[in-house]
Amino acid sequence: MTRKAHIQIDIDAKLAAEFAAAVTSAQTSEAEVLRAMVEDYVERQKVDGSYRQFLEAKVARGRGEVAAGDLVSAEEAERIFAARRELAGKASRA
């Protein structure tokens, strides 16, 4: 059996009235709308959390490379990618 939990929130009376009118107009219930909003929020946090972990790992790796002196100057990076662009252009024309 699924256990249920109740959440109580305090909101401005005007906002509560507007919300009630909006859900009535949409022919749904406040509970249905709030459940959907909570589910959406939880899912977005999972995605955001995964991306945050990915980004933190990438930053840590970059900082490690900097600390080890494993760097490429902006000028060298531009030369490398200019050569790659030129090769890609030749391949697409072939």
Image (tube, rainbow, N blue to C red):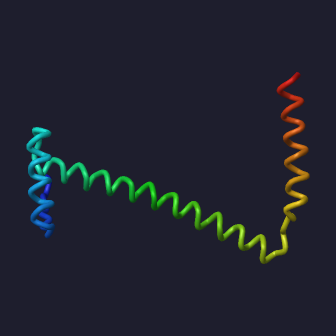
5 lies above or below 68:
above
Nearer to me, 3 or 66:
66
Q: Residue furthest top?
A: 94
Is 19 above or below relative to 85?
below
Residue 60 x, y percent position in the rendering? 66, 71
Q: What residue is at 9 percent from the left and 65 percent from the top? A: 13
26 displayed left or right of 82: left
Q: In which quarter of the image is residue 86?
A: top right
Q: Position of residue 24 (x, y in %)?
A: 8, 43
Q: Which residue is drawn at 9% across and 48% down?
A: 21
Image check: 62 left or right of 53? Answer: right
Point 81% across, 75% down: residue: 68
70 relative position to 62: left or right: right
Find residue 65 and report its horizontal and vertical position in percent: 77, 70
Q: Which residue lies furthest to the bottom in this view?
A: 67
Q: How many labels does the image show?
A: 0
